[in-house]
Image (cartoon, grey):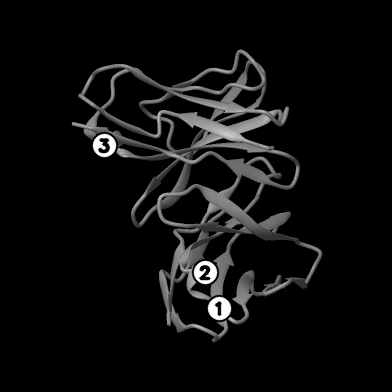
Amino acid sequence: EAQVTQNPRYLITVTGKKLTVTCSQNMNHEYMSWYRQDPGLGLRQIYYSMNVEVTDKGDVPEGYKVSRKEKRNFPLILESPSPNQTSLYFCASSSRYEAFFGQGTRLTVV
Amino acid sequence: GEDVEQSLFLSVREGDSSVINCTYTDSSSTYLYWYKQEPGAGLQLLTYIFSNMDMKQDQRLTVLLNKKDKHLSLRIADTQTGDSAIYFCAGSGSGYSTLTFGKGTMLLVSP
């Protein structure tokens, strides 16, 4: 079964404490991306990766890092989280025509 | 870059048809998508249409594309309470890999 798996699903953390949200796909897709979803703003792309070791900024990259050491994994790293990064995060893995989304990670930074 | 606009809310009665509208700015968008998000869930691709098509029908769903007006619509026939969700229109302005989403239309279906 085609899957994009994000962990954790829910996370509450404090300002400044580094965290990583993991994302893994089993479809051998080259393209993966991260989005955040905020009320009234829809989904905005944070970072994307066209292939292993190839990453690039999306529309809202500030405060985030990513890495793509293997094709299946694309973790999102918040080195020093701040309250304005409280959001719902989605990882996506794309074929040519379709993006498959993970279930989402609801992050709260206090 | 691409900009995608949608109306924010639509309320219909069960059994009626629903029409959700979307406008986009990038005329070079190759693919246009409709995604559905149920409460607490991720995004589920409902359907997509290539820019060289005018219409696509898939069971209860009909997508209409007016390239001249850059207008996309999703019609849901015989709307059910299970169709209540947020619907996102999305376009790929620079290839399939970069999706620009609208803010989403919340569809509420009442019995």
- Report the Cα–Cα distance between label 1 and label 2: 6 Å
Q: Which mark is residue B83?
A: 2
Q: Chain of mark 3?
A: A
Residue A75, x across and y down, in percent: 50, 22
Mark 2 residue type: Asp
Mark yes or no: residue A53 visible: yes
In the image, what residue occupies the spot 41% across and 69% down? B8
In the image, what residue occupies the spot 49% across and 41% down? A103
Q: Chain of mark 1?
A: B
In the image, what residue occupies the spot 75% across and 42% down? A96
At mark 1, the secondary structure is loop
At mark 2, the secondary structure is helix
Confirm or deny contact between disc 1 and disc 2 (CB under 8 A).
yes
Label 3 neighbour load within 10 Å: few <14, some 14-19, many 20+: few
Residue B43, x across and y down, in percent: 53, 50
For label 1, the residue is B79
- Disc 2 with disc 3 on a shared chain: no
Q: Residue furthest right?
A: B52
Q: Is residue B55 above or below residue B39?
A: below
Tell me which corner region of the image, top left, top right, bottom left or bottom right, holds residue B76.
Answer: bottom right
- Report the Cα–Cα distance between label 2 and label 3: 32 Å
Mark 1 residue type: Thr
The C terminus of chain B lies in which quarter of the figure?
A: bottom left
Residue A60, x across and y down, in percent: 43, 37
Tell me which corner region of the image, top left, top right, bottom left or bottom right, holds residue A71.
Answer: top right
Mark yes or no: residue B1 visible: no
Residue B101, x across and y down, in percent: 53, 53
Q: Is residue B29 above or below residue B19?
A: above
- Report the Cα–Cα distance between label 3 and label 1: 37 Å
Mark 3 residue type: Asn
Q: Which mark is residue A84?
A: 3
Q: Chain of mark 2?
A: B
